[in-house]
């Protein structure tokens, strides 16, 4: 039987948990789903959670959920903040990044989680829908990394997490543009 070695082993068998206490963690698409769950877990671990989403109602709800959990469990958290940001728009990302840096400092962990997955047959997809999928699921990663990587390099510290899907390697007739 072969054993796993090197990077593959590290990817499959997690090591010790990283201490995120007081680290600034930015999560895109934090208004619902996986983004919301990640935000809650980071906050419970003591991170300063910064929530970005294009939906003001849901991102505000995530922040309120975090505040309730933190208050009821007396978790040591410094702060949670939310911003309405459409990550498809490079200018909005740059403006929000500047506000974030001015208010909190450099981001320690960037979690590119925002994503959309319309479930339609290929022939039903409009050009606008295809562009939106690519702008949210691909281009937004470039806009956020462009904003936060330089400080991470300067500080010789930081993490960038890109949430992806197995749809990129497994075909599905209703996720053609997404995959």
Image: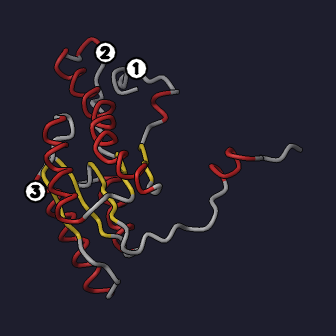
Judge whether 23 appears above or below 107 on screen. Answer: below
How many numbered circles are shown?
3
In depth, the one of 174 and 127 nearer the eye is: 127
- Quarter of the picture holding the C terminus: top left
Which residue does the numbered mark 1 point to in the structure image? 173
Instruction: Tell me which residue sits at (38%, 59%) in the image.
Output: 108
Q: Is mark 1 on a helix, strand or loop?
A: loop
* Closer mark to the observer between disc 2 and disc 3: 3
Tell me where residue 78 appears, x and y as whole percent: 27, 78
Instruction: Tell me which residue sits at (14%, 56%) in the image.
Output: 99
Could one spot residue 167 in this view of the protein? yes
Quarter of the rendering containing residue 45: bottom left
Which residue does the numbered mark 3 point to in the structure image? 57
Tell me where residue 82 appears, x and y as whole percent: 17, 61
Tell me where residue 20 appears, x and y as whole percent: 43, 69
Q: Is mark 3 on a helix, strand or loop?
A: helix
- Quarter of the picture holding the N terminus: top right
Q: How far apart are marks 3 and 1 (CA)?
A: 32 Å
Which residue does the numbered mark 2 point to in the structure image? 122
């Amino acid at each position: 039987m072969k054993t796993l070695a090197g990077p593959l082993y590290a990817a499959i068998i997690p090591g010790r948990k990283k201490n995120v206490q007081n680290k600034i963690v930015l999560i895109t698409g934090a208004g619902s789903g996986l983004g919301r769950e990640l935000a809650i877990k980071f906050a419970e671990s003591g991170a300063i959670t910064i929530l970005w989403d294009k939906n003001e109602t849901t991102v505000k709800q995530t922040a309120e959920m975090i505040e309730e959990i933190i208050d009821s469990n007396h978790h040591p958290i410094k702060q949670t903040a939310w911003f309405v940001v459409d990550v498809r728009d490079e200018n909005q990302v740059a403006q929000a990044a500047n506000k974030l840096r001015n208010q909190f400092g450099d981001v320690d962990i960037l979690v590119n989680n925002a994503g959309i997955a319309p479930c339609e047959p290929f022939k039903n997809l409009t050009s606008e829908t295809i562009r939106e999928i690519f702008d949210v699921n691909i281009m937004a990663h470039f806009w956020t990394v462009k904003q936060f990587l330089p400080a991470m390099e300067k500080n010789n510290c930081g993490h960038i997490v890109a949430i992806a899907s197995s749809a990129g390697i497994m075909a599905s007739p209703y996720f053609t543009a997404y995959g």
